[in-house]
């Protein structure tokens, strides 16, 4: 079984801006720069033949490229935050692409969770039981003016994610260009 997801990779200058904002957050384990990405669809654990079907479906997908801007920081998890993230400015092109990728994954036999798509780049996974929520909330609020981009999204990838002791190891299995 292969744990897989579809995502948009980020240019180096956007990654660098995210690292700078991570440094302003009181978090123990920021997501390493090479793992920063924007998930389109989490595919879960897939048998290899299903992954092959997903690849075929994504190869046949047609959607145009677009420009994306990251903006603002936030926390998921309410009073027990689990994730600190950078937000994404609303973008019709992104919503269109995400819907297409989700449709392609379902068509390939993946049971994708029915969740509203909230585009974000995870900056840190948090321990919801850890103290220091107030400090974290203040740091997130203080970085309200965070902005990175716009940058051109010219493709997206199919990734495998191998979980280990520390940060997950992500590897791009295939890349799908999006025409300008
Ligand atoms: P995240 O960015 O919100 O943390 C690889 O693990 C990617 O898939 C991560 O970007 C993560 O989203 C997402 N992911 C992992 N587990 C998930 C789950 N159970 N449901 C939805 N997305 C998940």
Image (cartoon, helix red, strand yellow):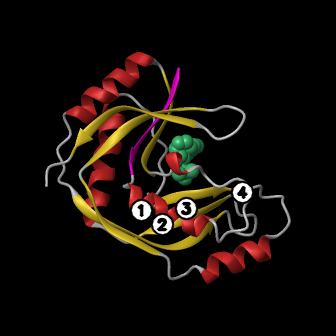
Contact? badges 2 and 3 (CB < 8 Å): yes
Contact? badges 4 and 3 (CB < 8 Å): no
Task: Identify residue for label 1.
Answer: 14
Q: Residue shown at 60%/51% (left/top)?
A: 31
Contact? badges 1 and 3 (CB < 8 Å): no
Location of residue 106 (image quadrant): top left
* Mark count: 4
Density class for disc 4 (Cα within 10 Å; few <14, some 14-19, many ≥20) is: many
The secondary structure type at the circle numbered 3 is: helix
Disc 2 to disc 1, C-alpha distance: 5 Å
| Magenta-drawn segment | 1-9
Residue in front for this viewpoint, 164 or 101: 164
Q: Nearer the viewer, mark 4 or mark 3?
A: 3
**At which x and y percent is residue 126?**
72, 57
Q: Residue shown at 58%/79% (left/top)?
A: 143
| Ligand 1 is within 8 Å of the C-beta of the residue at disc 1 | no
Residue in front for this viewpoint, 50 or 29: 29
Disc 4 to disc 1, C-alpha distance: 22 Å
Q: Residue placed farthest to the left in the image?
A: 180
Task: Identify residue for label 2.
Answer: 17
Disc 2 to disc 3, C-alpha distance: 5 Å
The secondary structure type at the circle numbered 1 is: helix
Q: What secondary structure predominates along the stretch shown in magenta? A: strand
Residue in front for this viewpoint, 108 or 52: 52
Task: Identify residue for label 4.
Answer: 126
Task: Identify residue for label 3.
Answer: 19
């Amino acid at each position: 079984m292969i744990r897989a997801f579809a995502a948009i990779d980020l240019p180096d200058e956007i990654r660098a801006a995210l690292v700078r904002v991570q440094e302003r957050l009181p978090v123990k384990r920021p997501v390493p720069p090479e793992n920063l990405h924007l998930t389109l669809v989490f595919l879960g654990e897939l048998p290899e033949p299903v992954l092959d079907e997903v690849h075929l479906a994504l190869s046949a997908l047609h959607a145009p490229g677009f420009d994306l801007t990251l903006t603002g920081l936030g926390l998921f998890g309410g009073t027990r935050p689990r994730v600190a993230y950078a937000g994404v400015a609303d973008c019709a092109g992104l919503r269109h692409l995400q819907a297409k990728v989700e449709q392609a994954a379902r068509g390939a036999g993946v049971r994708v969770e029915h969740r509203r798509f909230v585009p974000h780049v995870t900056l840190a996974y948090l321990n919801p039981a850890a103290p220091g929520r107030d400090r974290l909330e203040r740091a997130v609020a203080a970085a309200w003016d965070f902005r990175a981009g716009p940058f051109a999204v010219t493709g997206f990838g199919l990734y495998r994610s191998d979980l280990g002791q520390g940060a997950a190891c992500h590897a791009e299995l295939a890349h799908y260009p999006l025409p300008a």
